[in-house]
Amino acid sequence: MMKKWFMRQYWRLQQSQTLISMVFWCTTLTLLIWPYVSWRFDGGKETLGIAMTYWGLGSIAAGVLLSVLAIGYIYDQFLALWKEQRTVDTERNPFGTYALIPANVVIIGMMNRVLRDNANGDEKVIATCDWIDEWLKWCSSQEIWARSQRFWDDTFPEPVPDLFFLPDGAVEAARSVGKNLDD
């Protein structure tokens, strides 16, 4: 419980960091630049009822803000190094490429069964359903399925039934593997 609370506070700090750092950028750079350009703004004059000193400070702050945003836009549009990093992350994640999380195994298994029942003898649909059955069979033999099934068996009042879209004995095999897994 405390860990979750601390993580939420840390997340809040990260989220506010962007706005706070932008304020610091504008304030710091404005006050650093001001001594070099203050002679251009006569503090005794006003425009629209606002002293020229404030127009000068506001102009510098707006310039800093626009510069930082322009650099961010250019980086995002043209340099965009993070896009390749996301591609590599996805390629290395088995659940983004070839494996299924257990919840998706259940969903795809049920959808595959409905598709098979409504195929009306279409050989291409049946061949696709057969291939998906093989994929689901492989997924149900993986450790993550055994861990999830053990969780479901321990959490819900009834153990996982013999799921109709998995091969016979797949649920029991995963149950025996799950008993031998360490947390």
Image (cartoon, grey):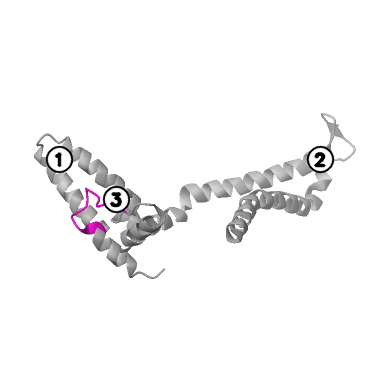
Q: In the rendered image, which quarter is residue 88 located in?
A: bottom left
Q: Can you identify the residue that label 2 sits on? A: 54
Residue 109 in view in this figure: yes
Quadrant position of the C terminus in the picture: bottom left
The boundaries of the magenta stretch are: 160-171
Location of the N terminus by quadrant is: bottom right
Q: Are marks 2 and 1 in contact (CB under 8 Å)?
A: no
Residue at horizontal 17 percent and vertical 37 percent from the top: 117
Of 118 and 41, the residue lying toward us: 118
Splitting the image into 4 quarters, where does residue 139 fall? Answer: bottom left
Mark 2 or 1, closer to the camera: 1
Q: Earlier in the sequence, mark 2 or mark 1?
A: 2
- What amino acid is labelled 3 in the image? Val
**Crowding at label 1, few (<14), some or many (≥20) Cα neighbours within 10 Å?**
some
Checking the image for residue 105, the label placed there is 3
x and y percentages locating residue 153 in the rendered image: 36, 57
Q: Is residue 48 left or right of residue 143?
A: right
Label of residue 125 in the image: 1
What x and y, as percent, mark residue 48?
82, 29
